[in-house]
Amino acid sequence: MSGSERPHVALVTGAGRPGGIGRAIAERLLADGCTVVMSDLGARMPDNPDYEVPSASELDRTIDELGELGPVTGIRCDVRDEAEVDAMIASVVAEHGRLDVLVNNAGVGGGLGEVVDMSLADWQLNLDVMATGVFLCSRAAARHFVERGAGGRIITIASQAGKSGMPLLAAYSAAKFAAIGLTQSLAHELGPHGITVNAVCPGTIDTPLLDLPGGLMEVYARRFGMEKERYRSRVTKAIPLGRFGQPDEIASCVSWLASEDAAFVTGAAINVTGGQEMH
Ligand code: NAP
């Protein structure tokens, strides 16, 4: 089947990191028959030189690996940059003739700590990537969807931290609450155009984000004065299903939201947490 015959063109942001949720989503959407464009940062952020970024070639390697599954291409884009985001959506439309599904997946895991110790830069980075970035990508996609008049899907990877605040996660949590609020407002505004807007709220998912230096596992383990492995097993016990989730379990939910089966679902923020979050 050629790209143009495939039912949907889908764009997944933050999809280049091996082992990440974005890659799993891209893989699943390809298996569903979509044409997929994967986007990622792929370079150090000049204003955050300490933020760990895999080499730029990793997005290319991921695209090579997934190329066996179907038509997939990549675009480097910093979701915080208005001009880059608008150019990314324009280039998808120029290359494929349309965009049908936007998956806002890009996220950062740094800047963890007590609010009293938090720098403005750490606060800002979380809000810029996971609130403003979602706004910019959703706005650009929505403009295309409305102009084209054939509906569309916006799916944002939020978090259980977007439903309940947690210690040491204030900036991350605030950004994810913002993403869910944006999802609900957009669902109202875009419903009349046949566009659905939903969020997926992962719980604790086994990805590199958790284990980055200075990342969630390390910071929480230190806070509770225990080894990382002991802290992991404590978290596991707090999950009713008794394990961490896997990236492909988030991808399944995205696949369903992108499908015709979910045509009447909008404004939802769906927990995929093994029961760790229930509201
Ligand atoms: P990940 O592997 O680190 O993926 C995050 C991706 O976002 C990376 O590829 C990263 O690019 C990219 N990114 C960061 N800043 C960006 C920017 N300014 N512009 C464009 N891309 C940017 O982490 P993940 O665990 O798969 O997370 C994916 C999403 O799920 C995130 O939104 C995260 O908040 C959410 N989530 C994860 C969990 C979990 O337990 N893992 C739980 C709840 C929610 P680089 O690789 O180039 O740095």
Image (cartoon, grey):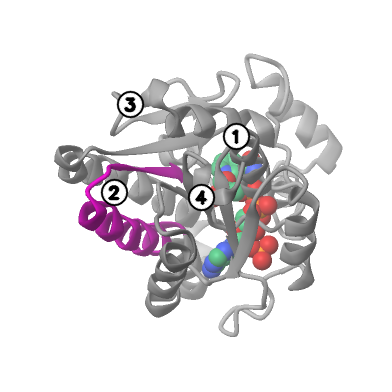
* Quadrant location, ligand no. 1: bottom right
Q: Choose the circle earlier in sequence order: 1 or 2.
A: 2
Q: Amino acid at mark 4?
A: Ser
Dot 3 alpha-carbon crowd within 10 angstroms: few under 14, some 14 to 19, many 20 or more: some
Query: What is the spatial separation of the Cα atoms under label 1 and label 4, in whole angstroms?
Result: 23 Å
Dot 1 alpha-carbon crowd within 10 angstroms: few under 14, some 14 to 19, many 20 or more: many
Query: What is the spatial separation of the Cα atoms under label 3 and label 1, in whole angstroms?
Result: 17 Å
Is 263 placed left or right of 34 in the picture? Answer: left
What residue appears at the point 19 percent right and 38 percent down from the top-left corner? 191
Eye-nearest disc, 3 or 1: 3
Query: What is the spatial separation of the Cα atoms under label 2 and label 3, in whole angstroms?
Result: 19 Å
Q: Choose the circle earlier in sequence order: 2 or 3.
A: 2
Label 2 sits on residue:
182
120 or 91: nearer the viewer: 91
Residue 33 located within the stretch drawn in magenta: no
Eye-nearest disc, 1 or 2: 1
Query: What is the spatial separation of the Cα atoms under label 4 and label 2, in whole angstroms?
Result: 31 Å
Label 1 sits on residue:
251
Task: Label 4, secondary structure: give it.
Answer: helix
Q: Choose the circle earlier in sequence order: 1 or 4.
A: 4
Check mark 4 vs ligand 1: CB closer than 8 Å? yes or no. no
What residue appears at the point 76 percent right and 47 percent down from the top-left corner? 19
Q: Main secondary structure of the magenta part?
A: helix
Eye-nearest disc, 3 or 4: 4
Q: Position of residue 96 (x, y in %)?
A: 47, 59
Eye-nearest disc, 4 or 2: 4
Q: Amino acid at mark 3?
A: Ala
Q: Quadrant of the N terminus?
A: top right
Determine which of the numbered discs, if any, sits on residue 80 in the image.
Answer: none
Determine which of the numbered discs, if any, sits on residue 4 in the image.
Answer: 4
What residue appears at the point 51 percent right and 43 percent down from the top-left corner? 5
Q: Choose the circle earlier in sequence order: 3 or 1.
A: 1
